[in-house]
Every structure is written in structure tokens, then in C-alpha cells.
Amino acid sequence: MNLRENKFDIAVGLTSGFSAIEPILLASVICEQGGADFSRTATALILSVAVGTFAVGLWGRCSLILAPSVPLAAFMTYETVLSRGLPWQKFTSALFIAGLLGLVALKFFPRSLTFLKFPPPLKWSLPIGVGFALIVEGMVQGRLALGAPLTIFMLGSLADPTAFYTSLGLILTSGLLIMGCRTALLIGMVAVAVLSFVEGFWIVPDAPFNLSTDLLRLVCCPDFSVTEELGEWIGLVLLLLLLFMTETQAMLEIWRKVTSDTSPSEEQRILACVLGANCLSAWLGGCGLRLAPESFVGATVCKPGYKAAYVTALTILPLIFLLPLAKEMVSFAAIFAPALIVTGTWLMGRGYAAVKDKNFTSGEAAAALTLILILGLTRDFLSGIGLALILYIFLEVMEGKRYRITISEIIWAFLFALYFMIYG
């Protein structure tokens, strides 16, 4: 039985590891536009993701994986660096201090960072929202959905090789899942990768290995010098700390609902791993990390053990020396898109099963729908949860149900309101 479980953990770990490659490279490309070096950023992210994921498995006894937060990388590049003129080294210093403050608070005030309790409608709708986000991302990457001038999306064409291979991967993966194959997602990825390589849609680069000295250049990157942007920098530290708490609690809430319960002490250890990995990423010159929605790619086929996190970390780590090859593979998105769509569908199904017998009030339904739409269309946890929480409190008050609102919800709504006023 242990041998069989270990085989499933290996399959889950490999699948999750391959799924994490795309956000690592995408975040590195975005950071490059803000002045950071691509190869150095990617190396920093690979190391911090591998270490953080291994720590979550070892210390948190959980197969959740870490990955770069692509929305946070975009926020750093476009809002902080390009719009406000703050150097990216200042952002990494804020990221490092936010992670360090979180670790100190978690050590001496362990309940201070885990008191965020989502209202019931937000709890119930989180799996649906994240599932919707994964489906949208998979369809856009796989070119099954395209931007349109008069509507949000329009369907792609199977004459497009990316859309064709995405559809092929979906059919293959779905068929294997129906047959009860627990390695369906991994087989689907490998099959599409091999077929598309044979057809010439991606190639092995002339120099597939990264043998540069990037590992030797990974020194302290944050800039801690005091400048006139001190007030803005302090606000950025607090914002990042709020983001860590919100996204981690949201992912843990989903994890509890779709896989298994976690104890409060385990959740605190997982949060400590996230904060520590962000400190490491900032020190090496990377961007912010989070518990990744891609964690559920492995959980789709079976209930994974914590050893899957070890396999994921070991799968990601060699990417340091294979950056040119990995970048070429990710350029053909049909390899990974089917796994995202299948996982999103599974998450939405689990979420629907949990809410189908619930009696929502109009306020609860509006808040839940807001969260689902914002998560699905933007993958922005902070904005989605913040707007949904504020709307929930407002509508509950308007309906005369103020007694259902807790003090922690009011505090969090106030913090989210400040965030929206400052950062729009």
C-alpha cells in the first residue's frame, strides 16, 4: 500500500512541478520589464519556490506548492516601478521586511496573522472562483478563448495549432480520468509535449542548458537605504503583509474544503513557510510568492500525501540549469493548458457540491458572485476578497442583519477600503 501511495505522490509531485514552471517564467519576464535581469530573477524564484515547497511538505505536512504571484509581479513592474518610479530593489526590500515582520508576529503573536475568518458565502465560493480562474487561464493560454472587440471572449479556431493540441490534451486527459487513471494529467502533458515536438511546434534550443554564473551572483539584492519615498515604502510593506495573510488564508480555506482538514498549528507552520520563502526570494532578487492554485492540479487525480511536495521541489530545482529549454516549452502553451482547465473544472464541481443546498440571502449571493467573477477574470485574490467582503457587509447592514457581522470582518473591510483608496 505504501509503495502504491508513493507512486501516486510521485505522479502528483511531477504534475504540480511541471504546472509551476509557467508562472515562474512568466513572472521573470514581467520583472525583466521593470529592470530586473531575467536569468537572475528566474534562478532566484526557482530556488525560493523549491525551498519553500519542500518546507511546506516537511514542516506543514501538506502537498501545497509555492509559485510566484504573477499579479504581484505585474503590480511591482507596472504600478510600483514604471508608474511610481520606485526601483525594483526597493520593492524587494519591502518584500523582505514584510516577510520578516510576518515571521516575528507569527512567533510572538501566533493568532495575529491567522484571525481572518471569511464570511460563509466567501468560504463557499472560493473553490468556485479559483476553479473559474484556472479554466479561464487555461482556455486563454490554449487559445480556446480569444479577446474580442465587442465581447469579453470569443471561441478560438481548431485551425490554430495551440487550440488544436489543447483540445487534444483535454480529450486525452478527460478520457483517462473517466477510466480512473490517477496519472492522467501527467500523461496528458507528456503526450502533448511529445506530439507537438514531433510536429515542430517547439524545438530544443541550440544551447538548452543554463551554465552561466547566475548562482554565484545571487547576493543581497534589496535596497534598504532611506530615501524620500519612505512613506510610500512603509505603505508597500503593510500592503504586502496584508496580501500574504489574505492569499494564504484563502488557499488554506480551499484546501480544507476539497482535500482534508488542517490543524491551526499546521496552518501557522504553512504560513511561516510562505513568509520565509518570500524573504529568501526578496534577498536573492525575486518577486513575491504565494500558495499556488496550481497545487490542485495534483489533487485532481487523488488525495496527495505531503511527500508530493518533496517531488515537486525536486522537479523544479533542475530548472535552474534548463532555463532555455523550459522557456521554449512554455512558449507552446497547449502542453500545460489542459491540466489547468481540468483542474478548474474539478474545483468548480467540488465547490458547487458544497453550496448547492445552501440558502443564500441576496447579500450573500451578490458577495459570492462578485468574488467568483473577480477571481475568475483577474486572479487577483486581494481585490476579489476585499470587494466581496465590503459588499457583503454593506448588503447585510442594508438588510438589517448587522448581528451577523463580526469584529474581524469589520477590521478587514476597513483595511481593504484603505488599500482601494491608496492603490485604486
Image (cartoon, rainbow, N blue to C red):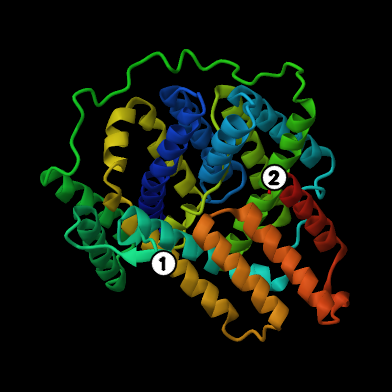
Query: Residue drawn 69% across and 82% down?
Result: 362
Residue 211 location (% of width, % of height):
32, 17
Residue 418 vs residue 83, the one in the foreground: 83
Residue 30 vs residue 353, the one in the foreground: 30
Look at the numbered discs 2 and 1 and tell me whether their residues touch, using CB distance below 8 Å: no
Query: Residue drawn 72% across and 29% down?
Result: 97
Q: Secondary structure at mark 2?
A: helix
Q: Is residue 356 left or right of residue 4?
A: right
Indicate whether 19 appears above or below 387: above
Mark 1 surroundings within 10 Å by alpha-carbon count, few (fewer than 14), some (14 through 19), many (20 or more): few
| Residue placed under numbered mark 1 in the picture | 151
Mark 2 surroundings within 10 Å by alpha-carbon count, few (fewer than 14), some (14 through 19), many (20 or more): few
Indicate whether 334 appears above or below 344: above
Q: Of marks 2 and 1, which one's residue comes earlier in the chain? A: 1
| Residue projecting furthest to the front | 150
Q: Is residue 78 left or right of residue 214?
A: right
Query: Residue drawn 66% across and 19% down?
Result: 223
Q: Amino acid at mark 1?
A: Thr
| Residue placed under numbered mark 2 in the picture | 423
Is residue 300 visible in the rendered image? The answer is: no
Residue 61 vs residue 337, the one in the foreground: 337
Query: Residue drawn 63% across and 21% down?
Result: 222
Residue 371 location (% of width, % of height):
61, 65
Q: Secondary structure at mark 1?
A: loop
Name the mark on residue 327: none
Residue 379 location (% of width, % of height):
53, 55
